[in-house]
Image (cartoon, rainbow, N blue to C red):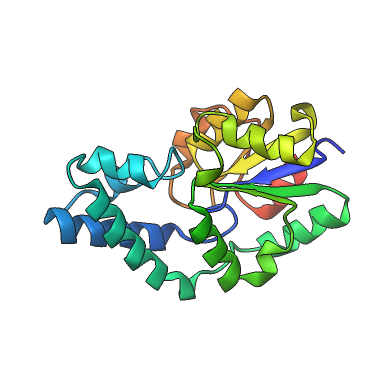
Amino acid sequence: MRFRTVLFDLDGTLVDSGAIILASFRHATRTVLRREIPDHELLAAVGGPGLREQMEALDPERVEELIDVYSTHNVGLHDDLQPCVGILDALETLRAEGRTLGVVTAKRRATLALAFEVLPELGGFFAVTIGAEDTQRHKPHPEPLLAALEQLGADASGAVYVGDSPFDVQAAKAAGVGSVAVTWGRIHSRERLERERPDAIAETVEDLLAAL
């Protein structure tokens, strides 16, 4: 077994939330800023340091208002949240193999809890969850991944991080764990992921299992 500890990002990796995220960004910027921002600009930092930093980049003077409008809209869309295709079966396979699984996300813990409330079959797989409030520094800094490993008592040499953003790959490398970039989230392009040189790129959950 190459990796005994498998840590996952949430959005675009475990849950198919790209459309929800984009819709909420569009709603917030149209409502608060009264202007249209290209989708690629809205999604460029998704998966990185967190929502506050993303909103600061859009308009540092109206961060709190942007966050409030985004969050209210985003929560209202969670009833339609679905797991990524095939991910539940993949998690079951990994658990049956004796792997230890965890989630490391830039999402706030309340939003993570909401995802698990909507998809209770998902939350039961994970021995550790790290959200935005659990560390002072966030992806691409390695602190969130290192916090997860510390809670699990796991070594970086036997761990891997699976995510759909360039920030996930950067964090994995900084933490000294393996990195697998998945493309099914459709938030970031394969070309952008390739530039980070992950250990593997997975187009399907079959590719993911083969890489682990």
Residue 121 percent coordinates (x, y) = 69, 70
Residue 200, can we see it? no
Residue 174 percent coordinates (x, y) = 59, 24
Outermost residue, bottom side: 79
Q: Nearer the viewer, residue 184 or 162?
A: 162
Total numbered labels:
0
Q: Residue at x 37, y 40 (%)?
A: 45
Q: Is residue 95 left or right of residue 25?
A: right
Q: Is residue 92 left or right of residue 164?
A: right
Q: Residue at x 17, y 57 (%)?
A: 32
Q: Quick check: 5 above or below 107?
A: above
Q: Is residue 195 left or right of residue 26?
A: right
Q: Quick check: 91 above or below 151?
A: below
User: What quarter of the picture does the C terminus occupy?
Assistant: top right
Q: Is residue 2 left or right of residue 73?
A: right
Residue 209 percent coordinates (x, y) = 75, 48
Residue 73, can we see it? yes
Q: Residue at x 25, y 62 (%)?
A: 27
Residue 167 percent coordinates (x, y) = 49, 35
Residue 158 occupies quadrant: top right
User: What quarter of the picture does the N terminus occupy?
Assistant: top right
